[in-house]
Image: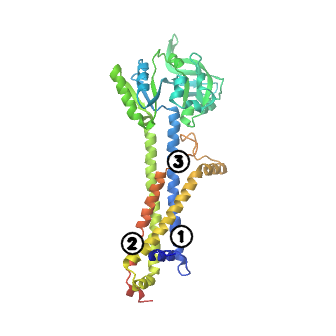
Amino acid sequence: MIRPLELGIALRYLASRNRTRFISFISLISILGISIAVAVLIVVLSVMNGFEYEVRDRILTVVSHAAITGIDGNMEEWRDLEDISVAYPGIAAAAPFVSGQGMLVSDRQVKGIELRGIDPARELATSSIGRLMEQGELQSLQAGEYHIAIGRTLAELLDVGVGDKLILMISQGVATPAGLVPRLRRFEITGIFYAGMYDYDLGLAFVNIADAARLFRMGDAVTGIRLTLDDAMQAPSLVREVARKFGNESGAGVYITDWTRQHANFFRSIQLTKSMIFMILLLVIAVAAFNIVSTLVMVVRDKRAEIAILRTLGASPRGILAVFMVQGTLIGIAGVFLGASLGLLIAWNIPWLAGLIETAMGFKFLAPDVYFISDFPVRVLWGDVVQIVSIALFLAFASTIYPAWRGAATQPAEALRHE
């Protein structure tokens, strides 16, 4: 097989010989250093991407893409707003809701919650809460029946199940001769859901919108309208356009919000963490890549006599430069692609590996009472992989320039003087 001269010499220098076994060993160490750094960066970013995607997906199963609420928490013209919303391009569905704070009281515990009154049929069109039901159905929340659906974690805390009754207490009081007394109502549990997010499973409860309106004495008004969009990423702009159109037609003022605003600090912190981790681990790749510098410097010193002979046989300084740049680049390529393969292998199997470690060590990496989720999500983005591989290859190539220049600058007479 005919190969370019520079490539052939570079491959020979990489191969182990009795005299150069140590050089081959440190070349292997350089390859392993780059591999480990690239693999760690791919795995960490994949876990961060998976965490962000999983949390966003689970949030959007419970939280609407956007919501428009009345200035004082009451909206009388909600039917007009609903008609405008469902007719607006890009909005898939709209549903009214009543929201308020309350406390659920069982025989054993008391827990503060967010109470959300919904129309079950419309809610199924605007959110995925229906597929989160573990026991019972969302349609069981019928008007006048005073049924309630709560999260699994809340049910475990209150030590209740489907068919049990709870007392719901809200802050709006009732004036009596004995003073102001909190408003109470007994509800029967007809559904238990599991969103996989601790805050929602512990602090959210659903009732029928008519029961909630009666409990909060809102009459025919609602708190606002929840919107589901064809593209959740368009929520900030679309909800503003809908609210502006409604305001122009009705003259009523409203508040608007969307899922990016409700959890802005959380997603911003994830992005900041990803950026910091990327930069830190990129420095690790840079350190591993710069090992190529020491490897090639040692090769150049060991091969001074051979470089001089090549020069006397007609090799140009550019050819000598190419030899050592090819050698360093091959080390970088081997390390980067070995690391990328290892990183992808670990990333795709990390849920299984994490479960194995948790079982063996008896602890959980993601405690559900600390993190939004308890699973170990992974999402490999090929754009990130390409970016990591490209930067690592560039750093490896840049590390070859100085040693290769030193080799090309070798003077044949000076190198052969002591041989």
Front: mark 1 or 3: 3
Q: Is residue 403 above or below residue 139?
A: below
Q: CA distance from mark 2 to mark 1?
A: 20 Å
Circle number at residue 402: 2
Residue 113 in sight: no
Q: Quadrant of residue 221?
A: top left
> What percent of the width, then of the height, locates residue 171?
50, 21
Residue type indicated by callout 2:
Tyr
- Residue drawn at point x = 42 percent, y = 83 percent: 310
Which residue position is annotated with label 3?
379
Q: Give the mark, 2 or 1, whose residue is nearer the N terminus.
A: 1
Q: Give the mark, 2 or 3, whose residue is nearer the N terminus.
A: 3
Query: Which element carries disc 2, helix, strand or loop?
Result: helix
Residue type indicated by callout 1:
Leu
- Residue drawn at point x = 34 percent, y = 21 percent: 249
Circle number at residue 28: 1
> What percent of the width, then of the height, locates residue 123?
52, 26
> What percent of the width, then of the height, locates residue 259?
45, 35
Labels 1 & 3 near each other (Cβ < 8 A): no
Query: Which element carries disc 1, helix, strand or loop?
Result: helix
- Crowding around mark 2 (Cα neighbors within 10 Å: few <14, some 14 to 19, many 20+) is some
